[in-house]
Amino acid sequence: MDEGKMDENEWGYHGEGNKSLVVAHAQRCVVLRFLKFPPSRKKTSEEIFQHLQNIVDFSKNVMKEFLGENSVHCGEVVQLPLDFVKQLCLKIQSERPESRCDKDLDTFSGYALCLPNLARLQTYRFAEHRPILCVEIKPKCGFIPFSGDVTHEVKRRVCRYCMHQQLKVATGKWKQISKYCPLDLYSGNKQRMHFALKSLLQEAQNNLKIFKNGELIYGCTDARSPVADWNELAHHLKPFFFPSNGLAGGPHCTRAVIRELVRVITRVLLSGSDKGWAGALRWGPGPRGPRVCEASPFGRSLHRQGKNSPECSGLPKGCLLYKTLQVQMLDLLDIEGLYPLYRRVERYLEEFPEERKTLQIDGPYDEAFYQKLLDLSTEDDGTVAFALTKVQQYRVAMTAKDCSIMIALSPCLQDSSSDQRPVVPSSRSRFAFSVSVLDLDLKPYESIPHQYKLDGKIVNFYSKTVHAKDAAVMSTRFKESEDCTLVLHKV
Ligand SMILES: O=P(O)(O)O[C@@H]1[C@@H](OP(=O)(O)O)[C@H](OP(=O)(O)O)[C@H](O)[C@H](OP(=O)(O)O)[C@H]1OP(=O)(O)O
Ligand SMILES: Nc1ncnc2c1ncn2[C@@H]1O[C@H](COP(=O)(O)OP(=O)(O)OP(=O)(O)O)[C@@H](O)[C@H]1O
């Protein structure tokens, strides 16, 4: 990229999250990722450069090691002309969802990250003329905490995502409770994975997006987004999955197309891209949480059938979901066990503030930082070193709980035998695919107290809501039995 000759007309709005905004180049397979900040919070250019450089270093030295060479794209920090950034910011403003406009794109520093556009097949630098379908999934936390420090009993039965749903709907973030449960997606069991993916397609929230040729065709930006339309989605997808047959439209066609999509995505998610992956994290035989969440409709139906520990095929070790889950499980103690350790580090830093640098709280995220993450012991010897290791592991785990997986699919040409990329078959076609991870920004040390409070809030709200629902069911039953008594009296 020639940073000297930048033209805002060659770039278009692509998407954004809570902390960054992404624009894509119209022809080339690259994106620019800018940081966003609340209007009042100004950072210096030097701070922004360092923040971005930390993101690159963390991806390179930590996440690439954990998740594999092929799935992590570190990108590079680029310096852009301020005029270009300002014009770009004006150009894209009208396309931004209202709910994201509480933060402004950084137009002050001129720094951004330049990354491959993962909504296109990443092996190609220039846009191909082949159609490309890309599915982005934010799977969230795939396990139930197994830490002995957990005090809320409900946390041992219901996963955080499912509990959080109640709070999100009550606060108006989303309109309805999703049937998606991360434990189903991470189960490795095809039936459960199909259920999880269909649930995401029904209620995408911020966990699913679909792009066609780099354009968003499915997914919602906030609770005000229009209702998902499967017929429209099927219309977009039909040429990919049923290229040459005249499958008529209508509900039958829609179902067939969605079924194919779900099957292909499941296959890709179960494929192991890095062969012979040994895994940097060597877990002992210690306890692991339950494999089914009680709030998942799938889990509930297993429960009704008396199958409390379902037959679990498990995830293949080389696949990206498996590796992501391993990194998530670096949250060994749960926030309840971690918070006192964070307080220990805090007390130490209050006494020796100059030590913050030596402890690598704000980087550098180098090889030494990575090596310390591999210590999985949970025996607290009372030291600051132990507390710090657990704190850093927790931050990495939280990052893996919030990252997204991008699956890019491109139909294989008839003569594509020389193609080096992995291929996934569907019933009427074949796709070359790539799987990548994005949003691997290490969660800040400062967010730990927030996590602690939020955890309590989610659990209390869930317990209260479920308790209220149970009470309502009980009272209905009581009324029914009263009615019944009346009937009996009458007789
Ligand atoms: O806490 P959670 O589970 O709600 O996750 C937050 C996400 O909400 P979600 O649950 O996916 O709707 C949230 O996503 P949205 O902005 O709601 O789309 C962010 O990803 C946030 O991360 P950060 O503070 O921007 O680094 C995420 O915060 P972290 O907890 O990962 O820091
Ligand atoms: N390299 C990339 N290629 C294609 N699209 C991307 C890329 N990076 C990000 N995106 C798109 O931009 C969106 C926002 O990016 P990202 O998730 O990194 O934002 P964020 O603000 O850090 O997220 P969060 O809300 O989780 O903090 C993504 O959901 C994805 O659709």
Image (cartoon, rainbow, N blue to C red):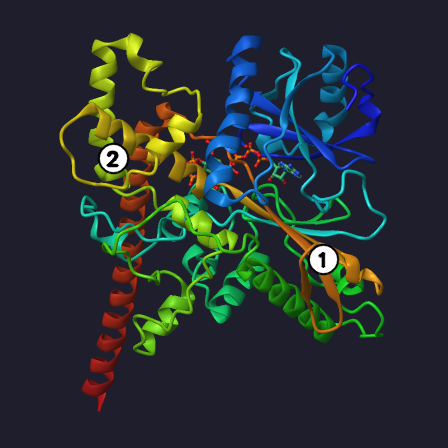
- Viewer-nearest residue: 129 or 295: 129
Q: Quadrant of ligand 2?
A: top right
Of the residues shown, which amino acid type is indicated by label 2? Leu
> Does the closest atom of ligand 1 sit within 8 Å of the Cβ of label 2?
no
Residue at image point 51% right, 51% down: 320
Classify 10 Å Cα crowding around label 2: few (below 14), some (14-19), many (20 and above).
many
Closer-to-camera residue (139/40):
139
Which residue is pictured at 44% across the width and 37% down the height?
399
Three-letter code for the amino acid on which mark 1 is drawn: Ala
Toward which corner of the image does residue 308 lie, by quadrant? bottom left
* Residue at 28% from the left image edge and 58% from the top image edge: 157
SS assignment at label 1:
strand
* Residue 440 image point, x, y percent: 51, 35
Q: Quadrant of the N terminus?
A: top right
User: Looking at the image, is mark 2 or mark 1 nearer the viewer?
Assistant: 1
Looking at the picture, does residue 111 appear above or below residue 481?
above
Q: Where, quadrant-wise, is the C terminus in this rendering?
A: bottom left
Residue with the mark numbered 2? 338
Q: Which residue is mark 1?
A: 432
Q: Residue 215 at what x, y percent from top left?
A: 75, 44
Q: Is residue 150 left or right of residue 359?
A: left
Cβ of mark 1 under 8 A from ligand 2: no
Is residue 373 in view? Answer: yes
- Position of 11 compared to 255: left or right? right
